[in-house]
Image (tube, rainbow, N blue to C red):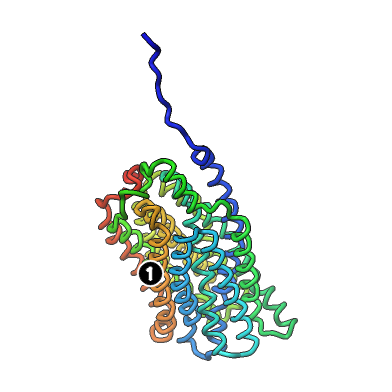
Amino acid sequence: MGEQRVEVPEISPLQADRAGMQRRALVVVVCSQVLGGAGLSAGVTVGALLAKDMLGSTALAGLPAALFTGGSAAAALMVGRVSNRHGRRPGLALGYLVGALGGAGVALAAILGSVWVLLPSLTVYGSGVATNLQARYAGADLAAPHQRGRAVSIVLVATTAGAVAGPSLVGVTGDLAVAAGAPALSGPFVLAALAYGSAGVVLLTLLRPDPLLMARSLALSADASATGVAGQGNSQRVVGVAATAMVLSQVAMVAVMTMTPVHLIAHGHGLDAVGAVIAVHIASMYLPSPLTGWLADAVGRLPVLVGSGVVLVAAGLVAALADPDAVLLLALALGLLGLGWNLGLVGGTALLTDATSLADRARTQGGVDLSIALAGATASIASGGVVAAAGYPVLALLGGAAGLLVLPAVLAGVRAPVGPDSDSAARAT
């Protein structure tokens, strides 16, 4: 009798080097996120203050965040479509470079004292905000389904360095601007323009091979076996659950964060105190990512989203009850706010990626980020009016209410199938 031969499936060189390509993609995206985080946080810290100075109204102080969040909505769609057609590298690089132009325009508007330059520039600046968020998807393209939460978390935590440095540099860049004969609040937006531009150059030159295009090539080389490229579509119900959770956490976070600097300044605190509180907030948005990513993979996407809702409710209550002079208590509230947002974003991103096929993943992700940005813009512009009419504590309670709404949204998805990546289904629930 002849010796029985066992055929071993052939593994292509691309499949064998998938882990190496994933590590390289993460390193490049991490570098860009450090820069992008600085651009994002510097503008967020002083945007409301600049609007209040130039427009002369507390009720309109939420307008900058509304404009760059609205701009980020259009940019999310643009980046998603370009990425879906041409890959993450050109999509993300384009988004950051457009954001850099917007940051430079805002700085110029502050110098000229021109509202007409300010408003469109803030909108264009939003492209960097959208790109900073969409970069998290690039970290998950080549990751195995059971490691997606951790991959997303690595990209988000990389933002911490720049995101914390940005608010911390508000005073320094303001002093430099004054020394150059420009308004103090123009300095942070010059920093934002330089940071976004550098992030775009890093991605454009170093993100090779493109993670999304390579994931598609790997899927084709494996005959689309369990990748969702062929024969499988999106699980629309799960996409809806992920999108709703991320939208609500964005609404809660943006509304309260936008008006906290105005609330602090109105009660006699300086830019250093504002920068410190926002630095705590942004660190809490990104620094817990390794833990939340591990939880999303090990415990499940939906339990992490439940945690998001609970923490956001706590953040709203602490902010509403905090004495305006209690900077440390407000910092705690903003820290909880950032943590709740992080749980929502990491859990929602992993769940969304599980439920989408590679063929249209970037387009779907861009559409979801469009919804997130529009909701954030609405919350931002409404926040100034709420504070002017009813006060900051009422705004904080409304933010907590948005977090509370996450819970029924998540419960609706408990029995939903996850979609293309069936091995992620158990972890989702």
In which quadrant of the rendered image does the N terminus lie?
top left
**Is residue 286 rendered to the left or right of residue 162?**
left
- With respect to residue 246, does 64 lie above or below? below
Is residue 277 something that shows in the picture?
no
Residue placed at 71% from the left, 82% from the top?
178
Circle 1 sits in a helix, a strand or a loop, which is it? helix
Q: Number of marks in the image?
A: 1
Q: Residue 211: x, y in percent?
A: 51, 52
Residue placed at 27% from the left, 50% from the top?
417
Is residue 296 something that shows in the picture?
yes
Amino acid on which disc 1 is placed: Ser
Q: Residue 363: x, y in percent?
A: 40, 62
| Residue extending farthest front | 2
- With respect to residue 290, does 257 lie above or below? below
Q: Nearer the viewer, residue 312 or 138?
A: 138
Q: Residue 290: x, y in percent?
A: 50, 50
Residue placed at 31% from the left, 50% from the top?
232
Displayed quadrant of residue 318: bottom left
**Is residue 243 rendered to the left or right of residue 269?**
left
Give the residue number, with chain letter if any, for mark 1.
371
